[in-house]
Amino acid sequence: MTLLLIAAALVGDGALPDMSKVLPDRARVAALERVVVMPHGARPLTHYRRTYWLEDGKIVGLFRREGPPGVDVAPEPPSHPRPASRVRDGGCDRVTVVYEPEEGRVLEVACDGEA
C-alpha cells in the first residue's frame, strides 16, 4: 500500500515528493506519545491501534481498540474519518488526539463520545 501511495505521488520528473509534507514524522509522533494523557475511561495508550496523519500543520491521531496495538502513519485519515470536533458514539474504544508539533503540545484528546 505504501509503495502504491509513493508511486502515485511521483511528480512529473520522477522525483519523490517531500514526505514531511505528506506523512507525520515518526520522531514527532513519538514526542506526542510521550506527552499525551489519555482521557478518563480510556485504556493505556499501548492498548490501541494508533493512526496518525497531518491536517493543517497539526498531527491528528485516531486510536482504535480494533486490530492489534501499534502505530501507523498515513497520508490521510483512516476510512470513516470523523473531524476531531464532532461528538461520536464510540466510547473510549476510539480516542482522537490533535497535536501541535511546532509547540510540542496536545491541543485536544477525547474519547469518541459515550456509548
Image (cartoon, rainbow, N blue to C red):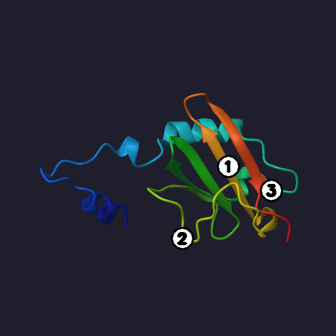
Residue found at x 55% / y 29%: 102
The kind of residue on which mark 3 rests is Arg
Q: Which mark is residue 79?
A: 2
Q: Which mark is residue 43?
A: 3
Residue found at x 30% / y 65%: 4
Marked residue nearer the N-terminal end (3 or 1): 3
Residue found at x 71% / y 66%: 65
Q: List x then y, in percent, for residue 22.
A: 40, 49
Residue found at x 67% / y 70%: 66
Residue 12 falls left or right of residue 108: left
Q: CA distance from mark 3 to mark 1?
A: 14 Å
Marked residue nearer the N-terminal end (3 or 2): 3
The kind of residue on which mark 1 rests is Val
Q: Secondary structure at mark 3?
A: loop
Image quadrant in which you'd find residue 83: bottom right
The kind of residue on which mark 2 rests is Ser
Q: CA distance from mark 3 to mark 2?
A: 23 Å
Residue 41 falls left or right of residue 87: right
| Crowd band around label 3 with a 10 angstrom C-alpha radius: few (<14), some (14–19), many (20+) | some
In the rendered view, tell whether residue 72 sits above or below residue 59. Answer: below
Residue where numbered disc 1 is placed = 97
Q: Secondary structure at mark 2?
A: loop
